Image (cartoon, grey):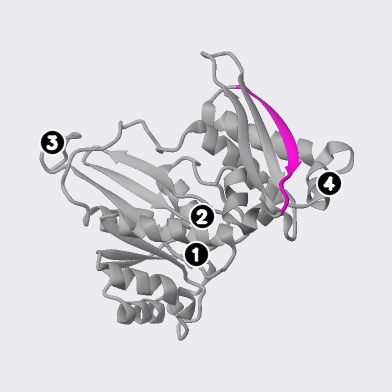
Amino acid sequence: MMTDEGEAGFRCGAVAMAGRPNVGKSTLLNRLLGSKIAIVTPKPQTTRDRILGILTMRDRQVLFQDAPGIHRSGKALNRRMVSEALAVMEDCDVVMVVTDARDPVDDLRRDEQVLQRVAAGRLPAVLALNKVDLIAKPALLPLIDAYSRRLPFKAIVPVCALNGDGLDSLLAEVTALLPEGPAMFPADQLSDRPLRFLASEFVREKVMLFTKQEVPYSTAVGIDLFEEPDPPAVVRIAATINVERSSQKAIIIGKRGAMLRRIGTAAREEMEALLGRKVYLELFVRVERDWSTSDKGLRKVGY
């Protein structure tokens, strides 16, 4: 029976989105919410921080926790990212494992680290086989069989985060596993992250999309100013793009500032779409040498 928030039968719980880098977790989160709160690029390890996405319906509230992909690395930044991902899996009611359906059916080693963590946690788990639009349908059954033999998933659902195929079924399977309880957030709230954080992420997304080689992974964005006066006044934001080398700074600025203007324009448009009003964005670039390699460096750029 359909219920209102807080009434008997209402379900509310946390769903950890687990998977290795670049399997489409953030795209899936944005599609489920119907709004962009997580940045998306074709590059692996785009997500660096835990992001809570809140989906509220009449009879349920789902707290999707997107986190960095689980991978192996000795770099300080990467260690922090994996720690975030593992913490999310320990503090949830359901685990949604997201994987790439294009992986060879006879080789699940790419997901082994994730699957081991899910097995150790002993929480109910649902598998989302993402990117099924890129494989032939006959390949699905052997893949489903292989994963079902590896772990006792409550459900295995083929989906395409990009076009939304299968997401209704995925959502039904996940929410059926949530505990009964009242909503934890207002119905109109999409995330627990402040707008300052989302603004910094939009800038970092554009850096990742528009630059190549090591530059995207050597970039951290801090917000220096965030003024949000009453509408319809313009929102004023100033941000600093931190890099590790002078050569990287030159790339981000570009010839006569062309690249920095391109990054700023694209990021500003994302911010205006989110805020529903005009934004004035000012960007700066600073060299913070080797910030990603040590805990001290991470603190300097705000991690």
Q: Who comes first in sequence, dot 1 or dot 3? A: 3
SS class, disc 3 = loop
Q: Who comes first in sequence, dot 2 or dot 1? A: 1
Q: Who comes first in sequence, dot 1 or dot 4? A: 1
From the viewer's perspective, is the residue at label 3 or at label 4 nearer?
4
Label 2 with label 1: CB-CB less than 8 Å:
yes
Q: Nearer the viewer, residue 93 or 243?
A: 243
The magenta-colored residue range is: 278-289
The residue depicted at 52 percent of the width and 62 percent of the height is 79
Residue 160, image x, y percentages: 46, 60
Residue 204 in the magenta stretch? The answer is no
Dot 2 corresponds to which residue? 162
Residue 247, image x, y percentages: 83, 52
Q: CA distance from mark 2 to mark 4?
A: 34 Å
**Amino acid at pointer 2:** Leu
Label 2 with label 4: CB-CB less than 8 Å:
no
Dot 3 corresponds to which residue? 7
The residue depicted at 78 percent of the width and 52 percent of the height is 245
Residue 282 in the magenta stretch? The answer is yes
**Amino acid at pointer 1:** Lys
The residue depicted at 61 percent of the width and 17 percent of the height is 234
Dot 1 corresponds to which residue? 131
Dot 4 corresponds to which residue? 250
**Amino acid at pointer 4:** Ala
Q: CA distance from mark 1 to mark 4?
A: 37 Å
Q: Who comes first in sequence, dot 2 or dot 4? A: 2
Q: Who comes first in sequence, dot 3 or dot 4? A: 3
Q: Is residue 138 left or right of residue 123?
A: right
